[in-house]
Image (tube, coloured by chain):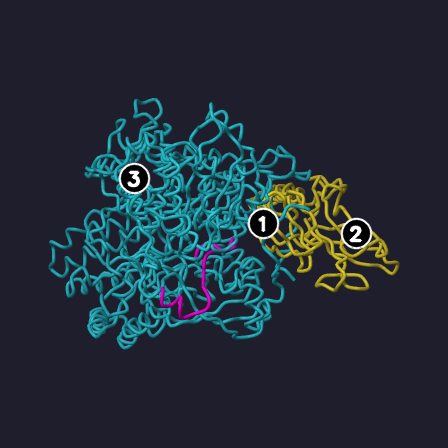
């Protein structure tokens, strides 16, 4: 039977339940929620005067009710040391989601740590160290002392290149402005660590270098633009499953035609219709099916290109649109450089593009018309250009990204209502760090670790065993190196600290690696680590982030972290404090001196030290003001406070209209420019004010036609097609029969680090699926649910066979980053010129491993696509 | 002795005060529809709600893939009764193929419709799909519950009764609405 909770009633929140602002800590959309909490021995009643909703709960509530929560939105947790009921339910008044809840966000409460209800018992509660041959709990002081002594010793021996760091750069859970600042100040401020990588890629680089090099920050529009566009073009994204409520709440109204009134009001004097949509994806997804259900098949174009050929298609679009004279000459003239040169370099005929992409000439021509042919009456067509991992993790990342921005700029769709050229995003954003001190291209960290470089590895919220490329090779090498240190540690009594440090550093000199893992759960890479430090997550600490339209909100602390877990920023401060002491004891006062300004007591202290002082507009932003602005917050950058004189809201780049701020931008995720060229204030952080004046933000970037380049002009780039650009991929394609395309599914957030303990999810997906066409299923002798091995020369992994009537022959699609079968095992180590991985273009073989295991017998293998009633 | 009596008395008064408060709280969950329970006569709340047995139809009324609209456990809660034509887990009747489900989508409460071609219930609100051959498993969708299924019993005359629900129904914090 399907998993059922057999819950037939839930406690009713009383009138005086506490309410905290919550932003879902999973995906970039950042839906607004509220956390309601009240003492465990109290409850409200169904009468309208007796519950927090003021609603008559003696009656059935209607569709889209704001007065109902599901069992997964409920839990019992600790708050200030006391058990409380907790309900985390969507906020009807949040402009992002308007009360909608995804299958992931609806489980924030259920995926919280509860001793009473036994949820997320995997959470790390105490520091753990490798002691007597196993991981043992210990105190913070004990663990941090060892971390500091070994780290200081390695730096003294090898220099700062001996310290390798893996750390997230995003917002939401396992990130946020407080924590990126805390870690950033430690590694890029107090130290100048170059050997750093990010959670999903093996170097410290941008996933969207090209758009930033062109002066166009990648989150430049607002979610309302999807309601205003004439046409939405989406490359390499499955937004119904991966930005669910952005799609449902902002794309669907436009596809249905229910945003027409808004279009007519906001954009008068031009023709309006319901939106058309162009979807570029080798695979047909539920997103395409939903678009067809809403807009009708004649307004949806799914371009199922040959995997990795996006660049040829985009160049052909630009060529055709330019030849037709549909480009925005006035905008190109006033606000850009390099158009003619780029157009010449990228010239691609419809016929050549058809040959490369596998599409027809008509498909390419018609889709170009949808995005650029002037509307009835001659008005410029408003087109929103969106993209995500199909492009980012795809062939020739840099050029394809640039080509897409070329197209958006040429058609005048950046900085204008109904437009934008935007990545759709994975995590929320929340980046505030001193500048990365390393080179470009940045060092390929996985290869350094595999080849024996570095002596100590600090890991923050990353699990390379699940979410890197070449993962099986990485794991084998990593285990070998860290085992050397484990064996050395097991031979020394713990009380002999100097003997322990000597044993560890001796093992490091022989090729060993000492690994420190900061996380909320015991990760797979944590199996290899010597110290694990327990972190608090969103809601267990106050945490700020911004979403895919730069909407910044504060998630308030509504529960206690488990055990002695702490916010990452305070853990970073703890490491800094210990390094200061240890370097001092080593007689290196000059080095110790660098670690002196980590005296934060709370995450708010870290916020005031970091974001408030260093980010553009940060001087206007405080916890008190964010708290007052609830789940709607404001859109970054802040430009002033209500009631005070401030720059026009249309201005995107500086304190005065047209001003171009040239702060460092390389690693600023999503918004440009990120910093003032000179920080507003670098002295002692100010005390947070209790003033709650409204912060004025920025709805769209670049509405003034000024971009983030020296002269304020966006730059067109030459981006000629050159086939599969990453070394080894063309050979792999020739050698192996199956494309092993890969990506996400609706039930699962990220690497399933919390989902892996949620019965609702694991009963649906006990293994990662691999979708195969019915013909391929037959050829391989597979029944639904059978376990298969996916293998090539890079490695091997397992998956569960799932027939898909819409899958193309020899094009498999496997769930990415799932704990029970790591797709990254079969991804080659090849990267682009800026060390961006190419997960999507992977080819391999498939063979049966075992008949369908018992835990697959209750699964459904029916089509996932919704169809309107016939 | 006088002092001891006084302490006992204080203790008794404190005890009664606590009891009264607890009873007032308990009454909220004890007030099942029609019970007329009041704080003064509070009884301990039961751990589970008590479901009515409701006759939905007779086996003879059912044809394969032709769902019958029903309501359960009350008129405000729509569902369907369905004969699938082959045995399924949780199916009742001589062919072990009769099932009943809520048709309020457990995501946002939109009314589900039945698609006979693949024996699924489908939501026009946000495209969620549930497999009626697999106990209401969410094939794809946004709900964080699989679809609530009504527990059925068939008597000697072929009358089909619903007598329970295995998940919380959309739009109510108690499957039996409380007065």
- In front: mark 2 or mark 3? 3
Residue A823 drawn above or below residue B34: below
Pointer 2 or 1: first along the chain: 2
Crowd rating for badge 3 (residues with CA inside 10 Å; few <14, some 14–19, many 20+): many
In depth, the one of A160 and A449 nearer the eye is: A449
Q: Residue at x 43, y 71 (%)?
A: A791
Give the x, y percent position of residue A447.
Answer: 27, 66
**Which segment is the magenta one?**
A730-750
- Drawn side of residue A406 relative to residue A264, left or right: left
Question: The disc numbered 3 marks a residue on which chain?
Answer: A
Chain under numbered label 2: B
Question: Crowding at label 1, few (<14), some or many (≥20) Cα neighbours within 10 Å?
Answer: many
Same chain assignment for discs 2 and 1: yes
Closer to the camera in the image, B37 or A339:
A339
Dot in front, 2 or 1: 1
Label number found at residue B143: 1
Question: Is residue B173 positioned above or below A166 on the image?
Answer: above
Q: CA distance from mark 3 to mark 1?
A: 37 Å
User: Given the image, what chain letter belongs to the residue carrying mark 1?
Assistant: B
Q: Which colour is chain A painted?
A: cyan
The residue where tag 3 is placed is: A672
Tags 3 and 1 both on a single chain: no
In front here: A11 or A830?
Answer: A830
Circle 2 Cα neighbour tier, 10 Å, few/some/many (<14 / 14–19 / ≥20): some
Taking A243 as reference, is A501 left or right? Answer: left
Image location of residue A271, percent across then percent down? 50, 28
Which residue lies under the disc numbered 2? B53
């Amino acid at each position: 039977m399907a998993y059922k909770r057999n819950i037939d009633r839930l406690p009713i929140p009383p009138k005086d339940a506490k309410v905290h602002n919550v932003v879902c800590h999973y995906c970039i959309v950042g839906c607004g929620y509220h956390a309601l909490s009240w003492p465990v021995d109290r409850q409200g009643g169904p009468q309208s005067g007796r519950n927090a909703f003021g609603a008559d709960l003696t009656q059935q509530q209607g569709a889209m009710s704001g007065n109902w929560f599901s069992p997964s939105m409920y839990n019992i947790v600790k708050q200030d040391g006391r058990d409380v009921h907790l309900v985390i339910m969507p906020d009807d008044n949040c402009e992002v989601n308007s009360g909608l809840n995804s299958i992931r966000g609806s489980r924030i409460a259920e995926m919280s740590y509860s001793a009473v209800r036994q949820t997320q018992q995997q959470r790390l509660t105490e520091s753990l160290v490798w002691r007597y041959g196993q991981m043992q709990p210990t105190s913070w002081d004990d663990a941090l002392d060892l971390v500091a002594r070994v780290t200081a010793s390695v730096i003294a021996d090898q220099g700062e290149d001996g310290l390798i760091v893996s750390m997230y750069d995003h917002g939401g859970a396992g990130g946020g402005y407080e924590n990126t600042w805390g870690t950033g100040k430690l590694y890029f401020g107090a130290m100048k660590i170059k050997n750093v990588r990010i959670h999903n890629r093996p170097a410290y680089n941008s996933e969207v270098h090209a758009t930033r090099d062109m002066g166009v920050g990648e989150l430049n529009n607002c979610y309302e633009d999807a309601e205003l566009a004439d046409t939405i073009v989406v490359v390499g994204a499955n937004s119904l499953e991966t930005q669910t409520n952005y799609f449902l709440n902002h794309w669907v109204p436009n596809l249905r035609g229910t945003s027409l009134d808004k279009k007519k009001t906001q954009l008068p004097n031009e023709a309006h219709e319901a939106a058309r949509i162009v979807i570029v994806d080798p695979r047909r997804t539920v997103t395409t099916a939903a678009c067809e259900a809403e807009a009708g098949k004649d307004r949806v174009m799914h371009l199922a290109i040959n995997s990795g050929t996006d660049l040829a298609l985009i160049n052909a679009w630009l060529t055709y649109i330019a030849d037709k004279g549909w480009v925005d000459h006035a905008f190109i003239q006033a606000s850009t450089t390099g158009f003619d040169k780029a157009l010449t370099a990228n010239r691609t005929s419809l016929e050549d593009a058809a040959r490369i992409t596998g599409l027809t000439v008509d498909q390419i021509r018609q889709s170009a018309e949808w995005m650029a042919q002037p509307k009835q009456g001659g008005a410029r067509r408003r087109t929103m250009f969106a993209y995500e991992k199909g492009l980012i993790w795809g062939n020739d990342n840099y050029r394809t990204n640039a080509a897409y921005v070329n197209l958006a700029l040429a058609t005048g769709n950046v900085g204008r209502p109904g437009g934008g050229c935007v990545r759709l995003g994975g995590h929320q954003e929340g980046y505030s760090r001193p500048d990365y001190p390393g080179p470009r291209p940045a060092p390929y960290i996985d290869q350094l670790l595999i080849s024996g470089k570095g002596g100590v590895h600090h890991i923050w919220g990353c699990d390379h065993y699940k979410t890197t490329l070449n993962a099986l090779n990485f794991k084998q090498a990593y285990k070998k190196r860290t085992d050397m240190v484990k064996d050395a540690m097991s031979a020394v009594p713990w009380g002999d600290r100097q003997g322990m440090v000597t044993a560890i550093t001796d093992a490091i000199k022989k090729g060993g690696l000492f690994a420190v893992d900061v996380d909320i759960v015991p990760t797979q890479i944590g199996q290899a680590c010597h110290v694990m430090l327990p972190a608090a997550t969103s809601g267990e600490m106050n945490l700020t982030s911004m979403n895919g339209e730069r909407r910044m909100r504060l998630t308030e602390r509504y529960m206690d972290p488990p055990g002695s877990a702490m916010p990452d920023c305070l853990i970073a401060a703890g490491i800094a404090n210990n390094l200061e002491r240890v370097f001092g004891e080593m007689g290196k006062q000059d080095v110790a001196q660098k670690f002196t300004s980590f005296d934060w007591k709370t995450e708010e202290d870290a916020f005031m030290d970091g974001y408030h002082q260093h980010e553009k507009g940060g001087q206007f932003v405080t916890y008190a003001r964010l708290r007052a602005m609830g789940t709607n917050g404001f859109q970054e950058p802040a430009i002033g406070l209500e009631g005070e004189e401030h720059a026009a809201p249309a201005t995107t780049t500086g304190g005065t209209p047209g001003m171009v701020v040239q702060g460092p931008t390389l690693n600023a995720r999503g918004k440009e420019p990120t910093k003032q060229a000179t920080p507003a204030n670098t002295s002692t952080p100010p005390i947070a004010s209790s003033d709650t004046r409204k912060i004025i933000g920025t709805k769209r970037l670049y509405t003034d036609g000024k971009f983030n380049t020296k002269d304020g002009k966006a730059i067109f780039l030459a981006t000629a097609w050159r086939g599969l650009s990453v070394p080894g991929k063309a050979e792999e394609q020739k050698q192996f029969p199956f494309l092993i395309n890969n990506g996400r599914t609706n039930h699962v957030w990220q690497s399933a680090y919390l989902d892996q303990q949620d019965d609702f999810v694991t009963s649906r997906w006990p293994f990662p699926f691999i979708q195969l066409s019915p013909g391929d299923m037959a050829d391989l002798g597979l029944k639904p649910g059978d376990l298969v091995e996916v293998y090539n020369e890079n490695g091997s992994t397992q998956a569960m066979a799932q027939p898909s009537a819409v899958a193309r022959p020899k094009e498999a699609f496997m769930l990415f980053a799932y704990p029970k079968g790591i797709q990254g095992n079969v991804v080659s180590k090849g990267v682009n010129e800026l060390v961006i991985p190419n997960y999507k273009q992977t080819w391999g073989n498939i063979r049966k491993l075992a008949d369908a295991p018992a835990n697959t017998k209750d699964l459904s293998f029916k089509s996932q696509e919704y169809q309107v009633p016939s | 002795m006088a002092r001891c009596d006084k302490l006992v008395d204080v203790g008794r008064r404190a005890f009664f005060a606590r009891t009264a408060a607890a009873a007032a709280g308990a009454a909220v969950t004890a007030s099942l529809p029609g019970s007329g329970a009041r704080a003064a006569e509070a009884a301990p709340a039961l751990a589970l709600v008590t479901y009515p047995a409701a006759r939905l139809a007779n086996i003879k009324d059912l044809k394969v893939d032709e769902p019958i609209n029903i309501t359960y456990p009350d008129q405000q809660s729509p569902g369907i009764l369905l004969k699938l034509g082959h045995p399924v887990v949780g199916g009742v009747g001589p062919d072990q193929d009769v099932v009943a489900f809520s048709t309020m989508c457990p995501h946002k409460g939109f009314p589900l419709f039945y698609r006979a071609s693949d024996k699924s219930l489908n939501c026009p609100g946000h495209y969620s799909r549930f497999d009626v051959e697999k106990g209401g498993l969410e094939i794809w969708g946004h709900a964080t519950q699989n679809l609530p299924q009504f527990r059925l019993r068939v008597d000697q005359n072929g009358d089909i009764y619903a007598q329970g629900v295995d998940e919380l129904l959309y739009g109510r914090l108690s499957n039996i609405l409380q007065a």
